[in-house]
Image: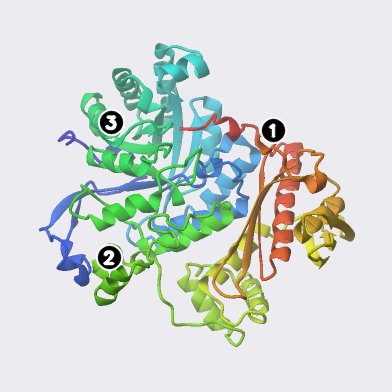
Amino acid sequence: MFAKSFNFYRSSVTKQLPFKKLATINRSTIAPTLKQYRYISHEVSKDKLIVFDTTLRDGEQSPGVTLKTEEKLEIARHLSALGIDVIEAGFPIASQGDFEAVARIAKEVGPLMTGREKTGKPVIIAGLSRAAEKDIKRCYEAVSHAPLHRIHTFLATSDIHLKYKLKFDRDECRKRAAAAVAYAKTLCDDVEFSSEDSGRSDKDFLCRVLEEVIEAGVTTVNIPDTVGYSNPEEYGRLIKYLIKNTRGSDKVIWSTHCHDDLGLATANTLSGILNGARQIEVSINGIGERAGNTPFEEVIMNIHTHPDYYPVYHTINTQQIYRTSNIVSSLSGMVIQPNKAIVGANAFLHESGIHQDGVLKNKLTYEIIRPEDVGIFNVNLVLGKLSGRNAFRTRLEELGYGDMSEDDVNVAFGRFKALADNKKRITDHDILALLSDRVSSGDSQRFELQSIQVVSGTHDMSTATVKLKDNSHNKELVDAAIGRSGPIMAVFGAIQRLVQRKIRLLNYEVRAVSEGMDALGKVSLRITGDVDDSENGEAKDSKKSSNAVYLGNGTDLDVVTASAKAYINAINRMVEEEINAQTGRGRVISFNKRVVDI
Protein backbone atom coordinates (compact mmCIF):
# COMPACT_ATOMS: atom_id res chain seq x y z
CA MET A 1 0.00 0.00 0.00
CA PHE A 2 2.87 2.33 0.73
CA ALA A 3 6.65 2.17 0.87
CA LYS A 4 8.05 -0.46 3.24
CA SER A 5 10.60 2.04 4.48
CA PHE A 6 7.89 4.52 5.39
CA ASN A 7 9.07 6.17 8.60
CA PHE A 8 6.21 7.56 10.67
CA TYR A 9 8.19 10.33 12.34
CA ARG A 10 11.32 12.05 11.15
CA SER A 11 14.13 11.21 13.55
CA SER A 12 15.45 14.77 13.62
CA VAL A 13 12.37 16.01 15.43
CA THR A 14 12.14 13.41 18.14
CA LYS A 15 12.91 16.01 20.77
CA GLN A 16 9.69 17.83 19.95
CA LEU A 17 7.69 14.86 18.74
CA PRO A 18 8.53 11.84 20.89
CA PHE A 19 5.88 9.61 19.36
CA LYS A 20 6.40 5.91 18.84
CA LYS A 21 6.62 4.66 15.30
CA LEU A 22 4.21 1.81 15.91
CA ALA A 23 1.81 0.81 18.62
CA THR A 24 0.23 -2.50 19.43
CA ILE A 25 -3.53 -2.45 19.58
CA ASN A 26 -5.25 -5.18 21.58
CA ARG A 27 -8.68 -5.79 20.17
CA SER A 28 -9.81 -7.25 23.48
CA THR A 29 -10.38 -3.68 24.69
CA ILE A 30 -13.47 -3.33 22.49
CA ALA A 31 -16.65 -3.04 24.54
CA PRO A 32 -17.97 -6.53 25.45
CA THR A 33 -21.44 -5.69 24.12
CA LEU A 34 -19.94 -5.25 20.66
CA LYS A 35 -17.64 -8.27 20.59
CA GLN A 36 -20.16 -10.74 19.27
CA TYR A 37 -21.06 -8.41 16.40
CA ARG A 38 -17.54 -7.64 15.19
CA TYR A 39 -14.64 -9.64 13.93
CA ILE A 40 -11.98 -9.67 16.67
CA SER A 41 -8.51 -9.94 15.19
CA HIS A 42 -5.28 -10.85 16.94
CA GLU A 43 -2.90 -8.12 18.05
CA VAL A 44 -2.08 -5.88 15.11
CA SER A 45 0.63 -3.25 14.74
CA LYS A 46 -0.74 0.08 13.58
CA ASP A 47 0.54 3.62 13.05
CA LYS A 48 -0.64 6.47 15.24
CA LEU A 49 -2.89 8.87 13.31
CA ILE A 50 -1.98 12.51 13.92
CA VAL A 51 -5.08 14.72 14.13
CA PHE A 52 -4.36 18.27 13.00
CA ASP A 53 -7.30 20.58 13.77
CA THR A 54 -7.75 23.77 11.74
CA THR A 55 -11.03 25.00 13.27
CA LEU A 56 -9.36 28.18 14.54
CA ARG A 57 -7.67 28.97 11.22
CA ASP A 58 -9.51 27.55 8.22
CA GLY A 59 -12.73 27.22 10.21
CA GLU A 60 -12.68 30.92 11.03
CA GLN A 61 -12.59 31.63 7.32
CA SER A 62 -16.21 30.51 7.06
CA PRO A 63 -18.21 33.49 5.74
CA GLY A 64 -19.39 35.62 8.65
CA VAL A 65 -17.34 33.84 11.33
CA THR A 66 -15.02 36.10 13.32
CA LEU A 67 -13.97 34.74 16.69
CA LYS A 68 -12.76 36.93 19.54
CA THR A 69 -9.57 35.98 21.34
CA GLU A 70 -11.44 34.69 24.39
CA GLU A 71 -13.63 32.53 22.13
CA LYS A 72 -10.56 31.11 20.40
CA LEU A 73 -9.02 30.29 23.77
CA GLU A 74 -12.20 28.54 24.92
CA ILE A 75 -12.30 26.41 21.76
CA ALA A 76 -8.57 25.67 22.00
CA ARG A 77 -8.97 24.40 25.58
CA HIS A 78 -11.70 22.03 24.45
CA LEU A 79 -9.59 20.84 21.51
CA SER A 80 -6.69 20.10 23.84
CA ALA A 81 -8.91 18.12 26.23
CA LEU A 82 -10.39 16.31 23.23
CA GLY A 83 -6.95 14.87 22.51
CA ILE A 84 -6.16 16.77 19.30
CA ASP A 85 -2.49 16.33 18.38
CA VAL A 86 -1.95 19.65 16.56
CA ILE A 87 -3.99 22.86 16.83
CA GLU A 88 -3.54 25.32 13.98
CA ALA A 89 -4.24 28.40 16.08
CA GLY A 90 -4.32 31.00 13.31
CA PHE A 91 -2.44 33.08 10.78
CA PRO A 92 -0.19 35.39 12.85
CA ILE A 93 0.84 37.77 10.05
CA ALA A 94 -2.81 38.64 9.29
CA SER A 95 -3.00 41.21 12.09
CA GLN A 96 -1.69 42.15 15.50
CA GLY A 97 -4.93 40.79 16.96
CA ASP A 98 -4.45 37.43 15.23
CA PHE A 99 -0.82 37.34 16.37
CA GLU A 100 -1.81 37.98 19.98
CA ALA A 101 -4.54 35.32 19.85
CA VAL A 102 -2.09 32.68 18.57
CA ALA A 103 0.49 33.73 21.16
CA ARG A 104 -2.03 33.48 24.01
CA ILE A 105 -3.14 30.03 22.84
CA ALA A 106 0.52 28.96 22.75
CA LYS A 107 1.10 30.30 26.27
CA GLU A 108 -2.15 29.26 27.96
CA VAL A 109 -3.25 26.12 26.10
CA GLY A 110 0.11 24.81 24.88
CA PRO A 111 1.24 23.49 28.29
CA LEU A 112 -2.13 21.95 29.31
CA MET A 113 -2.27 18.23 30.09
CA THR A 114 -5.93 17.91 31.14
CA GLY A 115 -7.53 15.04 29.21
CA ARG A 116 -4.28 14.16 27.45
CA GLU A 117 -3.46 10.96 29.32
CA LYS A 118 -3.60 8.90 26.11
CA THR A 119 -0.99 11.03 24.33
CA GLY A 120 1.20 11.71 27.35
CA LYS A 121 2.25 15.14 26.10
CA PRO A 122 0.74 18.58 25.46
CA VAL A 123 -0.77 19.63 22.15
CA ILE A 124 1.42 21.04 19.36
CA ILE A 125 0.49 24.66 18.56
CA ALA A 126 0.92 25.51 14.87
CA GLY A 127 0.61 28.73 12.94
CA LEU A 128 0.17 29.27 9.20
CA SER A 129 2.50 31.39 7.10
CA ARG A 130 3.02 32.10 3.44
CA ALA A 131 6.35 31.13 1.88
CA ALA A 132 8.01 34.42 2.85
CA GLU A 133 10.59 35.11 5.56
CA LYS A 134 8.54 37.91 7.15
CA ASP A 135 5.51 35.63 7.51
CA ILE A 136 7.55 32.70 8.80
CA LYS A 137 9.37 34.76 11.42
CA ARG A 138 6.10 36.28 12.65
CA CYS A 139 4.57 32.83 12.86
CA TYR A 140 7.46 31.52 14.93
CA GLU A 141 7.30 34.47 17.31
CA ALA A 142 3.66 33.61 18.05
CA VAL A 143 3.84 29.81 18.39
CA SER A 144 7.24 29.57 20.10
CA HIS A 145 5.64 30.17 23.52
CA ALA A 146 4.19 26.64 23.43
CA PRO A 147 6.34 23.71 24.67
CA LEU A 148 5.62 21.95 21.35
CA HIS A 149 5.18 24.18 18.30
CA ARG A 150 5.13 24.02 14.52
CA ILE A 151 5.53 26.37 11.55
CA HIS A 152 3.15 25.56 8.71
CA THR A 153 4.10 27.23 5.44
CA PHE A 154 2.51 26.84 2.04
CA LEU A 155 2.85 27.65 -1.66
CA ALA A 156 0.62 26.87 -4.63
CA THR A 157 1.90 24.31 -7.14
CA SER A 158 -0.84 24.08 -9.79
CA ASP A 159 -0.20 25.75 -13.13
CA ILE A 160 -3.39 27.79 -12.87
CA HIS A 161 -2.26 29.29 -9.55
CA LEU A 162 1.29 29.86 -10.75
CA LYS A 163 0.14 31.62 -13.92
CA TYR A 164 -2.75 33.73 -12.71
CA LYS A 165 -2.22 34.26 -8.97
CA LEU A 166 1.50 34.06 -8.25
CA LYS A 167 2.72 35.01 -11.75
CA PHE A 168 5.95 33.02 -11.74
CA ASP A 169 7.11 29.76 -13.31
CA ARG A 170 7.72 26.26 -11.97
CA ASP A 171 11.43 26.77 -11.33
CA GLU A 172 10.72 29.79 -9.17
CA CYS A 173 8.08 27.80 -7.32
CA ARG A 174 10.59 25.10 -6.43
CA LYS A 175 13.15 27.65 -5.25
CA ARG A 176 10.69 29.57 -3.08
CA ALA A 177 9.26 26.44 -1.50
CA ALA A 178 12.71 25.11 -0.58
CA ALA A 179 13.88 28.51 0.68
CA ALA A 180 10.80 28.91 2.89
CA VAL A 181 11.27 25.51 4.53
CA ALA A 182 15.03 26.04 4.94
CA TYR A 183 14.43 29.35 6.73
CA ALA A 184 11.65 27.91 8.92
CA LYS A 185 13.98 25.08 9.85
CA THR A 186 16.49 27.55 11.32
CA LEU A 187 13.77 28.63 13.77
CA CYS A 188 11.83 25.47 14.51
CA ASP A 189 12.47 21.72 14.29
CA ASP A 190 8.86 20.92 13.40
CA VAL A 191 8.01 22.34 9.95
CA GLU A 192 5.07 21.49 7.71
CA PHE A 193 4.76 22.36 4.02
CA SER A 194 1.51 22.43 2.06
CA SER A 195 1.42 22.40 -1.74
CA GLU A 196 -1.73 24.45 -2.33
CA ASP A 197 -4.10 23.05 -4.97
CA SER A 198 -2.29 19.69 -5.07
CA GLY A 199 -5.34 18.04 -6.60
CA ARG A 200 -4.92 20.04 -9.82
CA SER A 201 -1.12 20.07 -9.87
CA ASP A 202 1.03 18.09 -12.28
CA LYS A 203 2.02 15.00 -10.30
CA ASP A 204 5.60 14.75 -11.49
CA PHE A 205 6.24 18.45 -10.90
CA LEU A 206 4.68 18.09 -7.46
CA CYS A 207 7.12 15.26 -6.70
CA ARG A 208 10.04 17.53 -7.62
CA VAL A 209 8.76 20.35 -5.37
CA LEU A 210 8.27 17.97 -2.47
CA GLU A 211 11.76 16.52 -2.96
CA GLU A 212 13.15 20.05 -2.60
CA VAL A 213 11.31 20.74 0.67
CA ILE A 214 12.20 17.31 2.07
CA GLU A 215 15.85 17.99 1.36
CA ALA A 216 15.44 21.38 3.08
CA GLY A 217 14.31 19.59 6.23
CA VAL A 218 10.50 19.58 6.26
CA THR A 219 8.94 17.09 8.70
CA THR A 220 5.33 16.96 7.44
CA VAL A 221 4.13 17.19 3.85
CA ASN A 222 0.49 18.16 3.40
CA ILE A 223 -1.41 17.45 0.16
CA PRO A 224 -4.45 19.78 0.03
CA ASP A 225 -7.39 19.25 -2.28
CA THR A 226 -7.93 22.99 -2.03
CA VAL A 227 -11.09 23.29 -4.11
CA GLY A 228 -12.62 19.90 -3.30
CA TYR A 229 -12.10 18.74 -6.88
CA SER A 230 -10.87 15.17 -6.38
CA ASN A 231 -12.89 12.00 -5.85
CA PRO A 232 -11.76 9.34 -3.33
CA GLU A 233 -10.09 7.09 -5.90
CA GLU A 234 -8.18 9.99 -7.46
CA TYR A 235 -7.07 11.45 -4.14
CA GLY A 236 -5.95 8.10 -2.72
CA ARG A 237 -4.09 7.36 -5.93
CA LEU A 238 -2.36 10.77 -5.72
CA ILE A 239 -1.16 10.13 -2.15
CA LYS A 240 0.13 6.69 -3.12
CA TYR A 241 1.88 8.04 -6.24
CA LEU A 242 3.60 10.85 -4.35
CA ILE A 243 4.87 8.54 -1.61
CA LYS A 244 6.20 6.09 -4.19
CA ASN A 245 7.79 8.62 -6.56
CA THR A 246 9.13 11.33 -4.25
CA ARG A 247 12.73 10.89 -3.18
CA GLY A 248 12.96 10.90 0.63
CA SER A 249 9.25 10.19 1.15
CA ASP A 250 10.08 7.80 4.00
CA LYS A 251 11.58 10.68 6.01
CA VAL A 252 8.36 12.67 6.42
CA ILE A 253 4.76 12.37 7.57
CA TRP A 254 2.20 12.60 4.77
CA SER A 255 -0.94 14.59 5.48
CA THR A 256 -4.39 15.14 3.98
CA HIS A 257 -6.36 18.39 3.77
CA CYS A 258 -9.66 18.05 1.91
CA HIS A 259 -12.47 20.49 1.19
CA ASP A 260 -16.11 19.49 0.87
CA ASP A 261 -17.18 21.33 -2.30
CA LEU A 262 -18.48 18.08 -3.83
CA GLY A 263 -19.38 16.45 -0.52
CA LEU A 264 -16.37 14.09 -0.62
CA ALA A 265 -14.05 15.52 2.04
CA THR A 266 -14.51 12.66 4.51
CA ALA A 267 -14.27 9.97 1.82
CA ASN A 268 -11.15 11.58 0.34
CA THR A 269 -9.48 11.83 3.74
CA LEU A 270 -10.17 8.17 4.53
CA SER A 271 -8.85 7.21 1.10
CA GLY A 272 -5.69 9.16 1.87
CA ILE A 273 -5.24 7.21 5.11
CA LEU A 274 -5.63 3.89 3.27
CA ASN A 275 -2.91 4.97 0.83
CA GLY A 276 -0.26 6.09 3.30
CA ALA A 277 -1.26 9.42 4.89
CA ARG A 278 -0.70 9.46 8.65
CA GLN A 279 -1.90 12.97 9.46
CA ILE A 280 -5.38 14.36 8.77
CA GLU A 281 -6.27 18.06 8.71
CA VAL A 282 -9.85 18.50 9.86
CA SER A 283 -12.20 20.93 11.61
CA ILE A 284 -14.95 20.51 14.17
CA ASN A 285 -18.33 20.18 12.41
CA GLY A 286 -16.47 20.59 9.10
CA ILE A 287 -16.58 24.41 9.21
CA GLY A 288 -14.33 26.27 6.79
CA GLU A 289 -14.07 27.98 3.42
CA ARG A 290 -17.04 27.67 1.05
CA ALA A 291 -18.60 24.22 1.69
CA GLY A 292 -16.16 23.57 4.54
CA ASN A 293 -13.38 21.18 5.52
CA THR A 294 -13.28 17.52 6.44
CA PRO A 295 -15.46 17.04 9.55
CA PHE A 296 -13.25 15.81 12.37
CA GLU A 297 -15.99 13.77 14.01
CA GLU A 298 -16.83 11.83 10.84
CA VAL A 299 -13.28 10.62 10.19
CA ILE A 300 -12.58 9.72 13.82
CA MET A 301 -15.80 7.77 14.27
CA ASN A 302 -15.24 5.96 10.96
CA ILE A 303 -11.90 4.71 12.31
CA HIS A 304 -13.44 4.06 15.73
CA THR A 305 -16.28 2.02 14.22
CA HIS A 306 -14.04 0.05 11.82
CA PRO A 307 -10.97 -0.74 13.95
CA ASP A 308 -9.95 -3.69 11.76
CA TYR A 309 -10.19 -1.86 8.45
CA TYR A 310 -7.91 1.16 8.75
CA PRO A 311 -4.13 0.83 9.29
CA VAL A 312 -4.11 3.48 12.01
CA TYR A 313 -5.33 4.13 15.54
CA HIS A 314 -6.22 7.42 17.22
CA THR A 315 -5.89 8.82 20.76
CA ILE A 316 -8.99 11.03 20.71
CA ASN A 317 -11.28 11.20 23.75
CA THR A 318 -14.40 10.44 21.75
CA GLN A 319 -16.71 11.17 24.68
CA GLN A 320 -15.69 14.83 24.34
CA ILE A 321 -16.84 15.06 20.70
CA TYR A 322 -20.44 16.14 21.27
CA ARG A 323 -19.73 18.90 23.77
CA THR A 324 -16.82 20.25 21.68
CA SER A 325 -19.07 20.26 18.63
CA ASN A 326 -21.69 22.24 20.52
CA ILE A 327 -19.27 24.84 21.88
CA VAL A 328 -17.83 25.43 18.39
CA SER A 329 -21.33 25.75 16.93
CA SER A 330 -22.40 28.16 19.66
CA LEU A 331 -19.37 30.45 19.47
CA SER A 332 -19.07 30.44 15.68
CA GLY A 333 -22.79 30.83 15.00
CA MET A 334 -22.61 27.93 12.53
CA VAL A 335 -25.73 25.94 13.36
CA ILE A 336 -25.42 22.15 13.07
CA GLN A 337 -27.99 20.66 10.70
CA PRO A 338 -30.26 18.16 12.51
CA ASN A 339 -29.33 15.25 10.25
CA LYS A 340 -25.57 15.91 10.50
CA ALA A 341 -23.65 12.67 10.99
CA ILE A 342 -22.40 11.94 14.53
CA VAL A 343 -23.34 15.27 16.18
CA GLY A 344 -26.68 16.25 14.61
CA ALA A 345 -29.80 16.37 16.80
CA ASN A 346 -31.31 13.47 14.84
CA ALA A 347 -28.17 11.30 14.75
CA PHE A 348 -29.46 8.91 17.44
CA LEU A 349 -33.23 9.35 17.07
CA HIS A 350 -35.52 6.64 15.68
CA GLU A 351 -39.04 7.40 14.42
CA SER A 352 -39.84 4.33 12.34
CA GLY A 353 -41.88 1.80 14.33
CA ILE A 354 -39.77 -1.08 13.06
CA HIS A 355 -36.57 0.73 14.07
CA GLN A 356 -37.96 1.63 17.50
CA ASP A 357 -38.96 -1.98 18.11
CA GLY A 358 -35.50 -3.20 17.15
CA VAL A 359 -33.69 -0.64 19.31
CA LEU A 360 -35.84 -1.47 22.32
CA LYS A 361 -34.89 -5.15 21.96
CA ASN A 362 -31.23 -4.53 21.21
CA LYS A 363 -29.71 -1.16 20.37
CA LEU A 364 -27.17 -2.76 18.04
CA THR A 365 -29.99 -3.58 15.58
CA TYR A 366 -30.02 0.04 14.34
CA GLU A 367 -27.20 1.85 16.17
CA ILE A 368 -23.65 1.29 14.95
CA ILE A 369 -22.37 3.90 17.41
CA ARG A 370 -23.49 4.18 21.01
CA PRO A 371 -24.51 7.75 21.93
CA GLU A 372 -22.23 7.45 24.97
CA ASP A 373 -19.24 6.92 22.67
CA VAL A 374 -19.46 10.54 21.49
CA GLY A 375 -20.52 12.01 24.82
CA ILE A 376 -24.32 11.91 24.72
CA PHE A 377 -25.55 10.66 28.07
CA ASN A 378 -28.90 10.35 29.82
CA VAL A 379 -28.11 12.31 32.96
CA ASN A 380 -30.18 11.54 36.05
CA LEU A 381 -28.99 14.65 37.94
CA VAL A 382 -31.68 17.33 37.50
CA LEU A 383 -30.71 20.92 38.26
CA GLY A 384 -33.21 23.54 39.37
CA LYS A 385 -33.55 26.57 41.62
CA LEU A 386 -32.93 24.45 44.74
CA SER A 387 -29.67 23.05 43.38
CA GLY A 388 -26.58 24.16 45.25
CA ARG A 389 -23.20 25.37 44.12
CA ASN A 390 -21.53 21.96 44.57
CA ALA A 391 -24.06 20.21 42.32
CA PHE A 392 -23.58 22.94 39.72
CA ARG A 393 -19.80 22.68 39.93
CA THR A 394 -19.99 18.90 39.55
CA ARG A 395 -22.09 19.26 36.42
CA LEU A 396 -19.62 21.79 34.99
CA GLU A 397 -16.81 19.27 35.49
CA GLU A 398 -18.83 16.56 33.74
CA LEU A 399 -19.40 18.95 30.84
CA GLY A 400 -15.65 19.55 30.45
CA TYR A 401 -15.34 22.79 32.43
CA GLY A 402 -13.40 21.45 35.38
CA ASP A 403 -10.60 24.00 34.97
CA MET A 404 -12.79 27.07 35.47
CA SER A 405 -11.57 29.55 38.08
CA GLU A 406 -13.58 30.18 41.24
CA ASP A 407 -14.53 33.65 40.00
CA ASP A 408 -15.80 32.27 36.69
CA VAL A 409 -17.74 29.54 38.49
CA ASN A 410 -19.36 32.15 40.73
CA VAL A 411 -20.42 34.25 37.73
CA ALA A 412 -21.79 31.17 35.93
CA PHE A 413 -23.61 30.05 39.09
CA GLY A 414 -25.23 33.46 39.41
CA ARG A 415 -26.50 33.27 35.83
CA PHE A 416 -27.72 29.72 36.48
CA LYS A 417 -29.69 30.78 39.57
CA ALA A 418 -31.24 33.70 37.68
CA LEU A 419 -32.38 31.29 34.97
CA ALA A 420 -33.62 28.75 37.51
CA ASP A 421 -35.98 31.35 38.98
CA ASN A 422 -37.92 31.30 35.71
CA LYS A 423 -37.25 27.80 34.40
CA LYS A 424 -38.15 24.65 36.33
CA ARG A 425 -35.65 22.21 34.81
CA ILE A 426 -32.15 23.23 33.69
CA THR A 427 -30.64 21.01 31.00
CA ASP A 428 -27.04 20.59 29.84
CA HIS A 429 -27.94 22.57 26.73
CA ASP A 430 -29.07 25.46 28.93
CA ILE A 431 -25.81 25.42 30.90
CA LEU A 432 -23.69 25.30 27.74
CA ALA A 433 -25.71 28.17 26.26
CA LEU A 434 -25.14 30.30 29.37
CA LEU A 435 -21.41 29.57 29.31
CA SER A 436 -20.99 30.31 25.60
CA ASP A 437 -23.05 33.50 25.99
CA ARG A 438 -20.65 34.60 28.71
CA VAL A 439 -17.59 33.85 26.57
CA SER A 440 -19.05 35.71 23.58
CA SER A 441 -19.95 38.84 25.53
CA GLY A 442 -16.71 38.98 27.51
CA ASP A 443 -15.74 41.59 30.11
CA SER A 444 -14.50 44.41 27.86
CA GLN A 445 -17.64 45.14 25.83
CA ARG A 446 -18.26 48.78 24.85
CA PHE A 447 -22.06 48.66 25.06
CA GLU A 448 -24.05 46.71 27.64
CA LEU A 449 -27.81 46.11 27.64
CA GLN A 450 -29.55 47.48 30.74
CA SER A 451 -33.23 47.12 29.88
CA ILE A 452 -35.79 47.10 27.08
CA GLN A 453 -39.51 47.84 27.01
CA VAL A 454 -41.60 46.86 23.99
CA VAL A 455 -45.20 47.58 23.01
CA SER A 456 -46.54 45.48 20.14
CA GLY A 457 -49.86 44.43 18.68
CA THR A 458 -51.48 42.72 15.71
CA HIS A 459 -52.35 45.82 13.70
CA ASP A 460 -50.31 48.56 15.41
CA MET A 461 -46.70 49.48 14.80
CA SER A 462 -44.32 48.22 17.49
CA THR A 463 -42.39 50.62 19.70
CA ALA A 464 -39.30 49.89 21.79
CA THR A 465 -37.43 51.82 24.47
CA VAL A 466 -33.89 50.61 25.09
CA LYS A 467 -31.41 51.54 27.81
CA LEU A 468 -27.70 50.81 27.24
CA LYS A 469 -24.59 51.50 29.26
CA ASP A 470 -21.62 52.94 27.37
CA ASN A 471 -18.72 51.51 29.36
CA SER A 472 -16.11 53.61 27.55
CA HIS A 473 -17.73 56.82 28.82
CA ASN A 474 -19.41 55.32 31.91
CA LYS A 475 -22.85 56.71 31.11
CA GLU A 476 -26.34 55.43 30.40
CA LEU A 477 -28.04 55.91 27.02
CA VAL A 478 -31.79 55.78 26.48
CA ASP A 479 -33.76 56.06 23.22
CA ALA A 480 -36.84 54.72 21.49
CA ALA A 481 -37.83 53.69 17.97
CA ILE A 482 -40.77 52.43 15.92
CA GLY A 483 -40.61 49.14 14.03
CA ARG A 484 -42.95 48.61 11.10
CA SER A 485 -41.83 44.98 10.89
CA GLY A 486 -42.40 44.12 14.54
CA PRO A 487 -40.87 44.44 18.00
CA ILE A 488 -37.42 43.12 17.12
CA MET A 489 -36.95 45.71 14.38
CA ALA A 490 -38.11 48.38 16.82
CA VAL A 491 -35.45 47.25 19.32
CA PHE A 492 -32.78 47.20 16.62
CA GLY A 493 -33.79 50.68 15.47
CA ALA A 494 -33.49 52.06 19.01
CA ILE A 495 -30.07 50.46 19.45
CA GLN A 496 -28.88 51.97 16.16
CA ARG A 497 -29.92 55.41 17.39
CA LEU A 498 -28.07 54.88 20.67
CA VAL A 499 -24.80 53.76 19.08
CA GLN A 500 -25.17 56.42 16.35
CA ARG A 501 -24.52 54.29 13.31
CA LYS A 502 -26.42 52.74 10.45
CA ILE A 503 -26.25 48.95 10.42
CA ARG A 504 -27.31 46.42 7.83
CA LEU A 505 -28.79 43.17 9.11
CA LEU A 506 -27.62 40.35 6.86
CA ASN A 507 -28.90 37.27 8.65
CA TYR A 508 -31.10 36.48 11.65
CA GLU A 509 -31.82 33.08 13.21
CA VAL A 510 -33.59 32.09 16.41
CA ARG A 511 -33.90 28.61 17.87
CA ALA A 512 -34.82 26.93 21.14
CA VAL A 513 -31.89 25.64 23.16
CA SER A 514 -33.99 22.88 24.74
CA GLU A 515 -37.59 21.67 24.86
CA GLY A 516 -40.65 23.18 26.53
CA MET A 517 -42.52 26.47 26.75
CA ASP A 518 -39.84 27.84 29.06
CA ALA A 519 -36.93 26.93 26.79
CA LEU A 520 -34.07 29.38 26.36
CA GLY A 521 -34.07 31.16 23.02
CA LYS A 522 -30.72 31.53 21.25
CA VAL A 523 -30.37 34.20 18.56
CA SER A 524 -27.53 34.30 16.04
CA LEU A 525 -27.26 37.16 13.57
CA ARG A 526 -24.80 38.83 11.24
CA ILE A 527 -24.42 42.53 10.51
CA THR A 528 -22.26 44.85 8.46
CA GLY A 529 -21.59 48.55 8.80
CA ASP A 530 -22.71 49.48 5.29
CA VAL A 531 -25.08 52.43 5.09
CA ASP A 532 -28.46 51.42 3.68
CA ASP A 533 -31.50 53.52 2.83
CA SER A 534 -34.00 50.93 4.01
CA GLU A 535 -35.69 51.36 7.36
CA ASN A 536 -33.75 50.04 10.37
CA GLY A 537 -30.94 48.89 8.10
CA GLU A 538 -32.46 45.70 6.74
CA ALA A 539 -30.42 44.43 3.82
CA LYS A 540 -31.97 44.68 0.38
CA ASP A 541 -29.09 42.86 -1.26
CA SER A 542 -26.39 41.51 1.00
CA LYS A 543 -24.23 40.60 -2.00
CA LYS A 544 -23.49 44.28 -2.54
CA SER A 545 -21.80 44.54 0.84
CA SER A 546 -18.02 44.55 0.67
CA ASN A 547 -17.39 45.38 4.33
CA ALA A 548 -16.55 42.96 7.12
CA VAL A 549 -19.36 40.85 8.54
CA TYR A 550 -19.80 40.60 12.32
CA LEU A 551 -21.45 37.75 14.19
CA GLY A 552 -23.62 38.27 17.26
CA ASN A 553 -25.01 35.70 19.71
CA GLY A 554 -27.52 36.18 22.51
CA THR A 555 -29.45 33.87 24.83
CA ASP A 556 -32.48 34.59 27.00
CA LEU A 557 -35.88 33.21 27.95
CA ASP A 558 -37.36 36.19 26.07
CA VAL A 559 -36.43 36.02 22.37
CA VAL A 560 -36.76 39.81 22.01
CA THR A 561 -34.20 40.28 24.78
CA ALA A 562 -32.03 37.56 23.24
CA SER A 563 -32.22 39.44 19.92
CA ALA A 564 -31.13 42.68 21.60
CA LYS A 565 -28.19 40.90 23.26
CA ALA A 566 -27.10 39.36 19.95
CA TYR A 567 -27.36 42.72 18.14
CA ILE A 568 -25.28 44.47 20.80
CA ASN A 569 -22.78 41.60 20.79
CA ALA A 570 -22.26 42.05 17.04
CA ILE A 571 -21.97 45.84 17.40
CA ASN A 572 -19.33 45.42 20.11
CA ARG A 573 -17.34 43.23 17.73
CA MET A 574 -17.65 45.88 15.05
CA VAL A 575 -16.47 48.63 17.42
CA GLU A 576 -13.57 46.48 18.65
CA GLU A 577 -12.45 45.77 15.08
CA GLU A 578 -12.59 49.48 14.22
CA ILE A 579 -10.42 50.27 17.25
CA ASN A 580 -7.99 47.53 16.27
CA ALA A 581 -7.75 48.95 12.75
CA GLN A 582 -6.97 52.41 14.13
CA THR A 583 -4.28 51.08 16.46
CA GLY A 584 -2.71 48.76 13.88
CA ARG A 585 -4.12 45.57 15.42
CA GLY A 586 -6.74 45.04 12.70
CA ARG A 587 -6.47 42.32 10.09
CA VAL A 588 -4.20 43.44 7.24
CA ILE A 589 -4.77 40.36 5.09
CA SER A 590 -8.34 39.76 3.99
CA PHE A 591 -9.62 36.22 4.46
CA ASN A 592 -12.48 37.15 2.12
CA LYS A 593 -9.97 37.07 -0.76
CA ARG A 594 -8.88 33.58 0.25
CA VAL A 595 -5.20 34.47 0.12
CA VAL A 596 -4.53 31.80 2.74
CA ASP A 597 -6.86 29.12 1.45
CA ILE A 598 -5.10 25.76 1.19
Q: Residues within 10 Å of mark 1 (few under 14, many from 20)?
A: few
Judging from the image, what secondary structure is the residue with disc 3 in?
helix
Judging from the image, what secondary structure is the residue with disc 1 in?
helix
Horizontal arrangement in the rendering, residue 42 relative to residue 20 (left or right): left
Judging from the image, what secondary structure is the residue with disc 2 in?
loop
In the rendered image of this protein, does residue 454 appear above or below residue 191? below
Instruction: Looking at this view, name the residue that lies furthest to the bottom.
Output: 386
Q: Position of residue 168 (x, y in %)?
A: 48, 12
Q: Position of residue 356 (x, y in %)?
A: 32, 72
Give the numbered dot on residue 544: 1
Depth check: give the residue in front, 31 or 483. Answer: 483
Q: Quadrant for residue 437, please give it.
A: bottom right
Horizontal arrangement in the rendering, residue 176 relative to residue 28 (left or right): right
Q: Residue at x 65, y 32 (%)?
A: 588
Q: Position of residue 179 (x, y in %)?
A: 43, 21
Q: Is residue 472 visible?
A: no
Q: Is residue 315 visible?
A: yes
Depth check: give the residue in front, 17 or 524. Answer: 524
Residue indicated by mark 3: 234
Q: Amino acid at mark 1?
A: Lys
Q: Quadrant of the C terminus?
A: top left
Horizontal arrangement in the rendering, residue 453 relative to residue 540 (left or right): right
Q: Amino acid at mark 2?
A: Tyr
Give the alpha-carbon distance from disc 2 to disc 1, as whole Å: 48 Å
Q: Quadrant of the N terminus?
A: top left
Residue indicated by mark 2: 366
Give the alpha-carbon distance from disc 2 to disc 3, as whole Å: 32 Å
Give the numbered dot on residue 246: none
